[in-house]
Image (cartoon, rainbow, N blue to C red):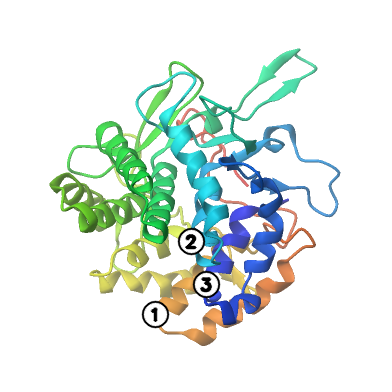
Amino acid sequence: MRLLAMLILSMVLVGTSPARAELSFCPGLVKAVEPGLKGTAAAFIRSYEPGADEDALPLGLSTTAFVYDNALAAIALVACERVDQARTIGNALVQAATYDRTFDDGRLRNAYRAGPLGRGAALLPGWWDSQKNIWGEDPAQDGTATGNVAWAALALLTLHQATGEAAYLSGAKRLMDWIIANASHGSDGFSGGFHGYDPQQVGLTWMSTEHNADVYAVASWLFRLTSAPRYRDAAKTAHRLLDRTFRGDHFLLGTKPDGSLADDNLLALDVQLWPWMAVPDAPDWRRALGFAQAHLAVDDGFDFNGDRDGVWVEGTAQAALAYRMVGNAAASQQLLAAMRNDGTSSGLLNATRSARVSTGLSIDPSGTSTSPDFF
């Protein structure tokens, strides 16, 4: 399988000027997503395409457009000077947050059905289960992760910056306001969001380092634009969770549902990179890059976690950006050069370089199951 985000992050790293466009991953991105965005004002792009050895996607992914991937696509398309295509995704994000089949509080789901949007509520992913003779949906896709809402807001802020259109700023504010109203965990940070089927979803009481880095990025950007105290306060709240999870040279995943810190043996690459990439005034946090190099590097890339069972292509792109930000251009280019072999004829990149890579995490974010079955 080839995940859209794998291409997107790596593409953004190389540069955005027209002279460098052909040296980047922009052409592959445009080739992959442009057909699904043509001729419509609002659309979501499917996150996965079948791999070279697959005839079709699993039913649970066959129609799925993850919000995180689409937000990244919009940001990347702006970087590639394809603002009109980015608008199509941005418009879909605004519409999906405005109209929902069940809720009226302005939330976004974790995923929607790929393709153009009609009027009203955006359709959710699903499939017909011929054995059970029922329509199937995935409770995680139907749910709402705080970090995904934040990434959608970042995409809308990027579009506002590129176009000056007030609707994108208003959309980003509504999403951040939803996070403040529904995911605040006192002054300690922001919780995970909601999980499950409509209409009775379960609130997720754990807090994620990654999510709080996302929220900090949105809240601080909105405060710069609006000077609204609620966004300044939200940035401070997210910062407190990041401070709490930093252990001198690395970050913990966040907290458990009971508020205690996550186990130190659970590692994740993005958690070591995103906090200091989002927060400019915390130089000590950059030690986490060295920790990631020591504990998660593998071959010509990086693993998701510390078992080093394979290369996570998207995470490797994140590491390339991290090296670029600290001024190590050689390390950044080395990772990107290796990733060119991950490209496929579709324009997308393979998600991994082996059959699968483990994460040590469970697909079920509610805590009901702790089986490490998320690959």
Judge whether residue 43 can be spotted in this image.
Answer: yes
Task: Please state the horizontal and vertical placement of residue 230, each as a whole percent of the image.
Answer: 17, 44
Q: Residues within 10 Å of mark 3 (few under 14, many from 20)?
A: many
Residue located beneath label 1 in the image: 326
Dot 2 corresponds to which residue? Answer: 269
User: Badge 3 is on which residue?
Assistant: 13
Q: Above or below — where is 130 with respect to 315?
A: above
Callout 2, which amino acid? Answer: Leu
Check disc 2: other Cα within 10 Å, few if <14, some if 14-19, many if 20+. Answer: many
Q: Which is in the foreground here, disc 3 or disc 2?
A: 3
Instruction: Work out whether mark 2 precedes mark 1 in sequence or the reverse, and give the earlier one.
Output: 2
> What residue is shown at x 43% (from left), y 46% (from top)?
152
* Circles 3 and 1 in contact, beta carbons < 8 Å: no
Disc on the earlier residue, 3 or 1: 3
As helix, strand or loop, the secondary structure at mark 3 comes to helix
Is disc 1 placed on a helix, strand or loop? loop
The residue located at (58%, 80%) in the rendering is 20
Local crowd size for mark 1, using a 10 Å CA cut-off: few (<14), some (14–19), many (≥20): few
Q: Residue drawn 37% across and 30% down?
A: 106
